[in-house]
Amino acid sequence: MGVAGARQLMRLLPFVELLWSVVRSAQPGDGRALEHDVRELLLREGVRSDHVPGGYTLLGVGSASGLWHQMDLEAQVADAVVVCELKAYRGLLPKNDLLCFVAATDDLFLGATRRAGRLPIVRALAGTFTTSEAERRYAAMHGTMLIEPDTIPAPLLAAGTMPFPDSLVPVPECERAAMASLVRPLQAVHRVAAGPAARGWEQLPHRMGIRSQAEWSKRLFAAKPGLAETIEVSAA
């Protein structure tokens, strides 16, 4: 990964750790409790965020289309903004929720491009759900961060800061770079979308990133039970 991308990734880590810590302890089926727990933890850790029921703006600007889109959270993380939707589903994430989230955040981003400027806008879908490989591929194509209880979030693995047991070698650099590519600012996503059509899915590194994230999550959980609890939650 490039120097700028690596620095941006490191700045997101505290926020990712916070969200993952709440998701791991949340009860499926209780969406209000999940939202409350995320709000309380962010407040306690000093993360600036907006929680507006039915909120439909990004950086105070409405969507490009004029449609209203509900978002659960807009958080200021270092020099970036994370737009987040929280879902307390039991089992597989309904694909329409993912499709709608990507479409809605695209619409909001296009409405706020002038206000955003170079401020990175990152989107995250977090909750008690699981995801299919096809959903992970779709999320990766659109740079969308997925945070679910039983998979280590891609930025944590990509950053190389996870506590590794002696029985495992560190994640290879090529796999870390592939996992880092799974989460990208909307500015970068839309640059790729506007680029040559020849840059297809097969040419992107996301497939390796998805496989690496799943495999290293399994290896780390198996080699070090209770691994998730050893990650220190720190303020953004």
Image: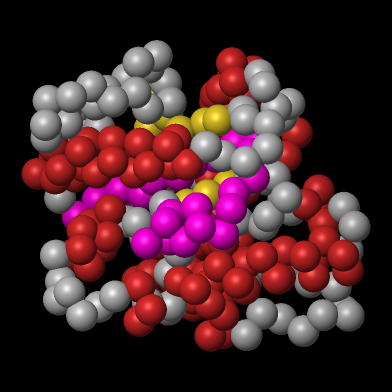
In the displayed structure, 37 sits above or below 94; it is above
Report x, y in % for residue 61: 16, 29
Q: Is residue 235 visible?
A: no
Q: Residue at x 17, y 31 (%)?
A: 63
Magenta run includes residue 137: yes
Relative side of 232 to 79, left or right: right
Relative side of 78 to 16, left or right: left
> Which residues make up the magenta segment?
118-141
Report x, y in % for residue 57: 24, 26
The quarter in which the N terminus is drawn is: bottom left
Report x, y in % for residue 83: 38, 38
In the picture, residue 107 is in which quadrant? top left
Relative side of 72 to 230, left or right: left
In the displayed structure, 26 sits above or below 215; it is above
In the displayed structure, 79 sits above or below 141; it is above
Report x, y in % for residue 194: 14, 65
